[in-house]
């Protein structure tokens, strides 16, 4: 009985963490991304967004290399093969991709080939949430 009550409470808390993101439809505009919001909300919100497809409309903060750039106030890491070729820091972009827990060996085994600068940069994001982009569009 106590286990059922505990599980019920945990589900309620997880649902409460999901609710703000469900209202957003996993779309974020502005300075803070839904990824950053989830990290601030805590483990239930992180669990809710992990593996989900998100769309972010925000400003490019830093271009690390052709496969890596950051967006948002908290520098959400965006990974995508050759996606920064036409981008500059300060550009407004729409990024659509899956939220993942960054583990370098897993990402590299999926075909990402980071140059030396990118490798040195992304190591700080180990086990952090990142977005593996399917699409990046520059906004007018």
Image (spheres, grey):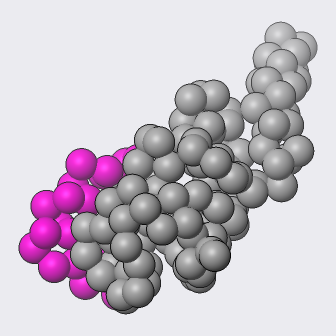
Q: Is residue 14 visible?
A: no
Which residue is rendered at x = 30% and y = 51% of the image? 126
Q: Position of residue 32 (x, y in %)?
A: 58, 42
Q: Furthest residue to the left? A: 116
33 above or below 27?
above
Q: Position of residue 34 (x, y in %)?
A: 65, 47
Q: Is residue 113 magenta?
A: yes
- Position of 136 with respect to 27 (left or right) is left
Q: Nearer the viewer, residue 2 or 111?
A: 111
42 above or below 63?
above
Image quarter (top left, top right, bottom left or bottom right) of the C terminus: bottom right
Tell me which corner region of the image, top left, top right, bottom left or bottom right, holds residue 69: bottom left
Q: Nearer the viewer, residue 83 or 93?
A: 93
- Position of 123 with respect to 128 (left or right) is left
Q: Is residue 50 magenta?
A: no
Which residue is rendered at x = 31% and y = 67% of the image? 63
Q: Nearer the viewer, residue 79 or 32?
A: 32
Q: Position of residue 25 (x, y in %)?
A: 83, 55
Tell me which corner region of the image, top left, top right, bottom left or bottom right, holds residue 120: bottom left
Which residue is rendered at x = 87% and y = 16% of the image? 5
Q: Furthest residue to the front? A: 140
Tell me which corner region of the image, top left, top right, bottom left or bottom right, holds residue 46: top right
Image quarter (top left, top right, bottom left or bottom right) of the N terminus: top right
- Position of 57 with respect to 119 (left or right) is right
Which residue is rendered at x = 79% and y = 24% of the image? 13
- Position of 135 with respect to 81 (left or right) is right
Total residue callouts: 0
Stretch in magenta: 107-128
């Amino acid at each position: 009985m106590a286990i059922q009550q505990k599980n019920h409470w945990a589900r309620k808390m997880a649902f409460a963490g999901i609710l703000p993101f469900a209202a957003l439809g996993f779309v974020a505009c502005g300075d803070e991304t839904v990824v950053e919001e989830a990290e601030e909300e805590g483990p239930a919100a992180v669990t809710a967004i992990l593996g989900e497809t998100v769309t972010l409309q925000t400003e490019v903060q830093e271009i690390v290399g052709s496969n890596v750039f950051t967006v948002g106030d908290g520098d959400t890491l965006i990974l995508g093969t050759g996606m920064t070729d036409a981008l500059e820091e300060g550009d407004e972009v729409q990024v659509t991709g899956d939220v993942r827990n960054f583990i370098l060996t897993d990402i590299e085994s999926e075909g990402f080939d980071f140059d030396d600068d990118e490798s040195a940069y992304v190591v700080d994001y180990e086990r952090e949430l990142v977005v593996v982009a399917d699409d990046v569009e520059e906004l007018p």
